[in-house]
Image (spheres, grey):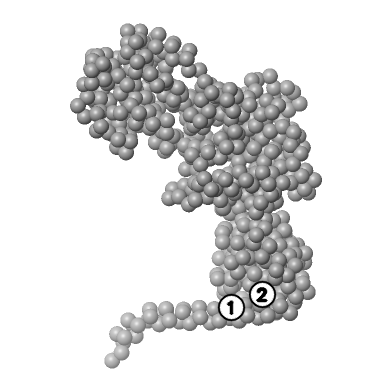
Amino acid sequence: MKNTTSNFERFTDKNLEWEILSVVKRKIETTPIVIAETFYIVYELSLRKDFSWYQEHALSDVMQLCYIHGFNTMSDYIVKDKNLAQSLLSLSQNVDSDIIRSLILNMGEIISGAIVRGNRRTKDMPDSIIDLTLALLAIKSKEEVADFCCGTGDFLVNAYMRNPESHMTGFEINSDFVEISKIRKLVVLEPENIKELIDIYSDNLQALVQHLEKQNNQIKIENKDILSDVVPLEDTNKAKKFDKVFCNPPMAIYSEPDTLKRNNLPFADRIRTMDWNFVAGVVQRLKDNGKGIILLPSGCAFSKLHFHRNAREYFVDHGFIESVICLPKRMFHFTNISLLLIVLSHGNENIRFVDASEVYERGRRINRFSEKNLETILNALNQDTGISKLAGKNEIVKKDFSIFPKDYVIPKEELGLLSEYGPLMPMEELTLSVSRGAPIMASSLDALSSEEDTGFDYITLADIQDGIVGKTLRHLTNIPKGYDKYLVGDKSIILSKVGKPAKFAIVHVPEGSQIMATGNLFVLELNRDKIDPYYLLAFFDSPEGNRILNHYYDGLTIPSIRIQSLKKIKIPVPSMEKQKIVAQKYRQYQKDLVTAKELVQKLIQSRTDVFDEGMKEG
């Protein structure tokens, strides 16, 4: 071989990506397929740049290779555009094949911005999630591993690189993703002596491809909908089973009820989301001692909707759920919400719940797991800790088959400290009632609004500022028929239903007046023989109480607290004498705060008036 490259070290991993894309962008739109195929072409050219025949034969050699594998998009462009062909040929002479190989194996983030699957933007699989998943699956040599909804192959590539003796199969319904996965598969499977093989088979490219396919068959990619193999749950699934399965399905995929019922799934009525169908797909393809992992939106774990609740009951009763991990927010590029990582296997009598929502290292664009974070989570899966608990089926049944970790795991360390202040009592034992605000549309409120003080007011979330209800509530012409049950009692506590941090305040109802709470509020009518309203506010406002209260706020896009969770929050309840001392101090600070805010408003107004008043002075 003869080295014809004069500037071998010109490109580094930092600028090579930009150089390649800049060459292509001048000619064509950089779709995911164009990006992936271009990187592959540059890689294959870089493997041939040291041969004496590079200028004459390398490009045609690589184009033929692309056509053999079915990578036709860029090949067709290059055949039509000689300038583009020459640019890639010249660029590849200055490329280190190891660098472009690394870019291909990690190209998920490079191409992610242009990919959309269903109604979610499909991004690369973050290293932190792959690290956790592979640690949980503990893949062994020679095991059969599947990736359902494999996307562009992030999990497959990483799983193979860490377990090269295992056999991987990826299933993906999107044909573009399949091609990108195949490109990454070809690159990761190429042997260390690939340049020697290229030289040996320089006159017979087809023979080279056959040789590589025969030697490297550990990864297979199928263009297939994995749900097509799901059978009625009482039947035996005859499709191939695997030792380990990973599934990151598209979120919020909907289908017609008839499509769901084709598999006779007992939870397929009255709603069209496919989340639990993917769970069934994983379970049915596991070997008896197999283990699977699936990522789902957290709402699946606690939703009262018929479909979700019945699905959870089925999978819990049949012992398919081994553990559920609540992941932190912002772990993925495609969403800011917290997802659930559910571990599936056979014969589970109990379920381990782990609330890892606060176990992470903050990143600039996404959060990540450090080695210490991973160790904390893995340890929590083996024993009860401050973030984990093992729950039996009886406890899960009592919680209406919720599998949401926050329903089982409470911040024990925090509660342990608070128990020193008095017995811990759940909110439901300290209240006469916990109710929601009125479910009334803004347009209906506008129609009922009055400029005059009628003695009928309504209170909204916006009326709570710094733990105090504003003095000027909006008036209603009357309380609508049937809405009496949403009236707030004097000295009741109102609490925000949505948003973090939680907002709360005490409501004083003037004699002869009525105040109605609106939909984004909970109303807590306290048993004042047990707890003082201002003491409870003081607890909520404390760092400890605030952390415990906000622990229960969760959701897909906007955090919210469920009424069942609110009732279970434990409050330290000292003697009434001690409560009164705390309440009196808190109430005095609230009065001082109101006075200070009024003074600030006067000062702001006075500052605003300085110019006019100064100019009018003689």
Give the answer, above or below, for where 291 lies relative to 530: above
Kind of residue at badge 2: Tyr
Look at mark 1 in the image and give the residue it sits on: 590
Residue depicted at x 42% and y 37%: 109
Cα separation, mark 2 vs mark 1, equals: 10 Å
Q: Is residue 369 visible?
A: no
Around disc 1, counting alpha carbons within 10 Å, would you say few (fewer than 14), some (14 to 19), or many (20 or more)? Answer: some
Quadrant of residue 250 within the rendered picture: top right
Identify the element where label 2 is drawn.
helix
Q: Residue 534 bears which disc, if any?
A: 2
Instruction: Please tell me which residue lies in front, 261 or 113.
Output: 113
Type of amino acid at the residue the image marks with label 1: Gln
Number of residue marks = 2
x 28%, y 28%: residue:
95
Residue 450 locus on image (x, y percent): 59, 70
Observer-nearest residue: 495 or 397? Answer: 397
| Residue 527, visible in the rendered structure | yes
- Residue drawn at x 72%, y 58% is 568
In the rendered image, residue 292, in percent from the top left (x then y), is placed at 63, 32
**CB under 8 Å between callouts 2 and 1?**
yes
Residue 575: percent from the left, percent from the top? 75, 75
